[in-house]
Image (spheres, rainbow, N blue to C red):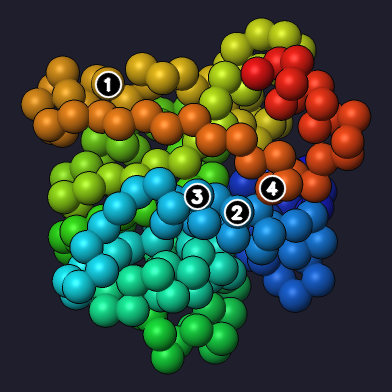
Amino acid sequence: MSNSSPKYPLLSPEWWNDYFSPGGGWEERGGRLQTRVFVTVFCRRIKLDKNCELKILDLGCALGEAIKIIRHNYPKAVLTGMDFSDTAVERCKKELGAIADFKKGSIEELDGFYDVIYVSALLEHFADYREKALRLIKHCRRLIVFVPYLEMRDGKPLEADPDQHHQHTFERSSFDFLVKMNLAESIETHIARCPEAWSWSRKTWVKECLIKN
């Protein structure tokens, strides 16, 4: 993801609104495809009861691609989408308001309680991801988080940098602190290759999937 709106501070509310606008960077850079890839992995690997009216929150729902696929896989679920961007939420309401509720808000503004909170391509944007996870875990029975695995910058683990999108390098143990704090019974870690989510060239695919991993 690159900065499509240099007139706004990176990752500010104004930046995200511009990014999610029609013809903005999110769609131009394959954000819808990336969302579909991640949620398809979620639905394939994480087994939930399809016969229950599960309350599922897609936090950081962007333009709602995950909501569509979750609805297809869990037709009885009660779905909510939440995003920091006014633009994203309004577009979701217009396109998908018949199958889910949508509301604008940040992690700090989260309320209510859900059977599942699904968080994809979000926590890597926060240097204080632990505090965000602590907040989230209090609002659900099951927290599903998708983050980049062992992402590096110039061959080194990521450090907080306001000029960059991603602020932290995640490892297998990055969320184990939730168990140590008695806030989670267990942590399951799944590592999935999702090269198509970034529209990689064949050369990049070989490097990332066959050499790096």
Residue at the spot 12% in from the left edge and 31% down from the top edge: 185
Q: Which residue is mark 2?
A: 37
Q: Position of residue 76 (x, y in %)?
A: 26, 79
Q: Is residue 206 left or right of residue 142?
A: right
Q: Which residue is mark 1?
A: 176
State the residue in front, 25 or 142: 142
What is the secondary structure assignment of the residue under circle 2? Answer: helix
The kind of residue on which mark 4 rests is: Ala
Task: Count residues near mark 3 (Cα–Cα under 10 Å), then give few for <14, some for 14-19, many for 20+.
Answer: some
Query: Is residue 19 visible to us here?
Result: no
Q: Nearer the viewer, mark 1 or mark 2?
A: 2
Q: Secondary structure at mark 3?
A: helix
| Contact between labelled residues 4 and 2, with CB atoms less than 8 Å apart | yes
Q: Is residue 170 left or right of residue 10?
A: left
Q: Is residue 143 visible?
A: yes
Question: Of the residues shown, which amino acid type is indicated by label 2?
Answer: Val
* Residues at circles 3 and 1 in contact by the CB criterion of under 8 Å: no
- Distance from Cα at disc 3 to Cα at disc 1: 22 Å
Q: Which residue is mark 3?
A: 41
Among the two numbered marks 1 and 4 on one chain, the one whose residue lies closer to the N terminus: 1
Mark closest to the chain's N terminus, 1 or 2: 2
Mark sitting earlier along the chain (3/1): 3
Is 118 placed left or right of 138 in the picture?
right
- Tell me: residue 95, above or below residue 123: below
Task: Tell me the residue at 45%/87% (across/down).
Answer: 97
- The crowding category of the residue bearing disc 1, from other C-alpha atoms within 10 Å (few below 14, some 14 to 19, many at least 20), is some
Q: Depth check: give the residue in front, 133 or 76.
A: 76
